[in-house]
Image (cartoon, rainbow, N blue to C red):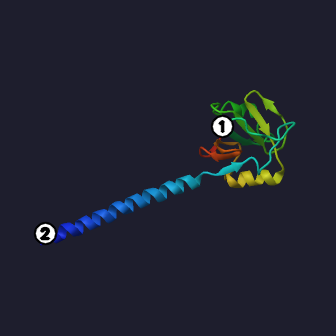
Amino acid sequence: MNKGRGQISLVFASFFGAALIAAAFAYSNYRFSEYKFIDFSKWIFYTKKDIFIPEHDTYTVVIYSSNMQDFDTILDKVSKNNPLLVIDIFQQKRGKEGDVLFIWSGMNTLLQVIQRFNIYELPSAFKIKKNKNKNFKQDSLVEIID
């Protein structure tokens, strides 16, 4: 009689193990889908003179408004481990300053970026990492720069 209970326990243990593996897989997929992609071949950005073409594998994207903040005060608060891609919502065209590249685009593209990355407050920053070609994947949460 004890032999039957052992087999039932083994079946429940196997089921429980399979459920844990499925839950871990689902959570992994959820975490992966939480981050967004940006494809610079579909969303066109401009530097001061040319179309922006990514040259590095990682960037820190900073979104701010030059109408509201002075960028130099923001720059002190941003990690400089990666080159900076700076998007000015007010659309002033500054070009490249050291490792800081100011890019701009049409309003429809800017609104798509704001919506895709859930930007609710300015200035904000997040990291992106090259996925393939001109397609980049978000590599950090969006941080509000105080």
The percent position of residue 3, horizontal first and vertical second, equals 15, 69
Q: Residues within 10 Å of mark 2 (few under 14, many from 20)?
A: few
The percent position of residue 40, horizontal first and vertical second, equals 74, 46
Which quadrant is home to the N terminus? bottom left
Instruction: Please tell me the numbered disc located at residue 57.
Output: 1
- The amino acid pointed to by label 2 is Asn
Looking at this view, name the residue that lies furthest to the right: 49
Q: Nearer the viewer, residue 112 or 70?
A: 112
Q: Residues within 10 Å of mark 1 (few under 14, many from 20)?
A: some
Q: How many marks?
A: 2
Looking at this view, name the residue that lies furthest to the left: 1
Q: Is residue 10 above or below residue 89?
A: below
Task: Tell me if 107 is positioned left or right of 23 in this view.
Answer: right
Q: Is residue 56 above or below residue 39?
A: above
Whole-angstrom CA distance, mark 1 to mark 2, is 61 Å
Give the residue displayed 71% in from the left and 45% down from the top: 134
- The amino acid pointed to by label 1 is Asp
Q: Is residue 107 above or below residue 4?
A: above
Task: Tell me if 140 is positioned left or right of 70 in this view.
Answer: left
Task: Tell me if 77 is positioned left or right of 43 in this view.
Answer: left
Mark 1 touching mark 2, by CB under 8 A?
no
The percent position of residue 12, horizontal first and vertical second, equals 28, 67
Residue 99 found in image quarter: top right
Residue under label 2, please give it.
2
SS type, badge 2: helix
Instruction: Please tell me the numbered disc located at residue 21.
Output: none
Give the residue displayed 73% in from the left and 51% down from the top: 113
Give the residue displayed 85% in from the left and 36% down from the top: 48
SS type, badge 1: loop
